[in-house]
Image: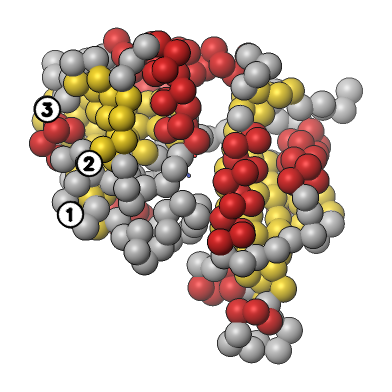
Amino acid sequence: HSYPAGVAFLDGQYLPMSEAKISVLDWGFLHSDATYDTVHVWNGRFFRLDLHIERFFGGMERLRMSIPFTREQVTEILHNCVALSGHRASYVEMLTTRGASPTFSRDPRDAINRFMAFAVPFGSVANAEQRERGLHVAISNRIRIPPASVDPEIKNYHWLDLVRGLYDAYDSKAETALLLDFNGNVAEGPGFNVFAVKEGKLSTPAIGVLAGITRRTVFDLSGELGLDCNAVDVSVTALKSADEVFITSTAGGIMPVTKIDGGLIADGKVGPITRKLEKLYWDKHEDPAWSKPVSYPS
Ligand code: PMP
């Protein structure tokens, strides 16, 4: 096996990615019983790390997991992983699994929760060409796991629906997938939220989706630009007849969509509001109120 260059934190130690190994008996692996968060470092600076830490601790609380680290200690561990990796553009993940039970008991309360983290090179949902011309997306006929089953507020690894949607999309020559919710409205895709722009107003699905930090950032940036932005039900028709469509993720930021199910969005060109938000988003990566520098060893 080979692994990307990076540094992991596991059981109190900082290790190269190739040495960061967990037990096959961990409930995180056996039952998707885990929560995680991802944050990125761009130009040597963490972007909105405090919001990611808050979401991560909120997920652990709801799953009744506890770790022997405070928010400040987790922040420091993530900084150390990036500093030791030397990456100036990094994808950083923190996760807590239910862990393994010393007796293989079936009671999750017997498992010892396990926190780990790692920093690897930054990777985007969209490549350079796709960011330039806009992504081609397929609407999947798989339904995103409903919120009554798995609370999407808890960032989780229930991704089988998303991954199968992605393969279906590849089969139909699209580049990524969008899944619908139980009512047939648009939900989210493999690792991203979605927005539609119509007559200068933005909308994004309200329920059954992760409260993405990039999604939240789009609300904040729309406010700065004086644009109306709302979380509502978004129908497939509304999405396909929008003036502009874009997706949002920590792994890539704000990324244009110009084709859905083979049909163009408006004239098929990336729209002005998408471009304006995208620029402002990356500009904020230099702003000390939004981003904090990593102290790399000299
Ligand atoms: N939805 C899902 C299912 C995700 O996994 C992610 C990111 N991993 C997102 C949306 C986007 O969230 P964020 O902007 O916080 O990266």
Picture coordinates of residue 290 (x, y %)? 62, 22
Say which amino acid is labelled 1. Asn
Query: How many residues crowd mark 1 within 10 Å: few (<14), some (14–19), many (20+)?
Result: few
Q: Is residue 187 above or below residue 216?
A: below
In the image, residue 48 sits, relative to residue 286, either above or below, namely below
Question: Which residue is found at the position 58% from the left and 87% from the top?
Answer: 106
Residue 213, how many percent across, how many down? 50, 36
Contact between marks 1 and 2 (CB within 8 A): the answer is: yes
For numbered disc 1, what is the local secondary structure? loop
Q: Point out which mark residue 241 bears.
A: 3
Mark 3 crowdedness (10 Å alpha carbons): few <14, some 14-19, many ≥20:
some
Q: Say whether residue 3 is visible.
A: no
Q: Nearer the viewer, mark 3 or mark 2?
A: 2
Q: Quadrant of residue 20?
A: bottom right
Question: The residue tagged with tag 2: helix, strand or loop?
Answer: loop
Q: Image point 80% across, 46% down: which residue?
A: 73
Front-lying residue, 175 or 63: 63
- Marks 1 and 2 sit apart, C-alpha to C-alpha, by 10 Å
Q: Mark 1 highlights which residue? A: 183
Left or right of 19? Residue 198 is left
On residue 233, which mark appears? Answer: 2
Quadrant of ligand 1: it is top left
Q: Does the image show residue 296?
A: yes
**Which-is-in-front pick, marks 1 and 3?**
1
Q: Is residue 240 left or right of residue 174?
A: left
- Say which amino acid is labelled 3: Ser
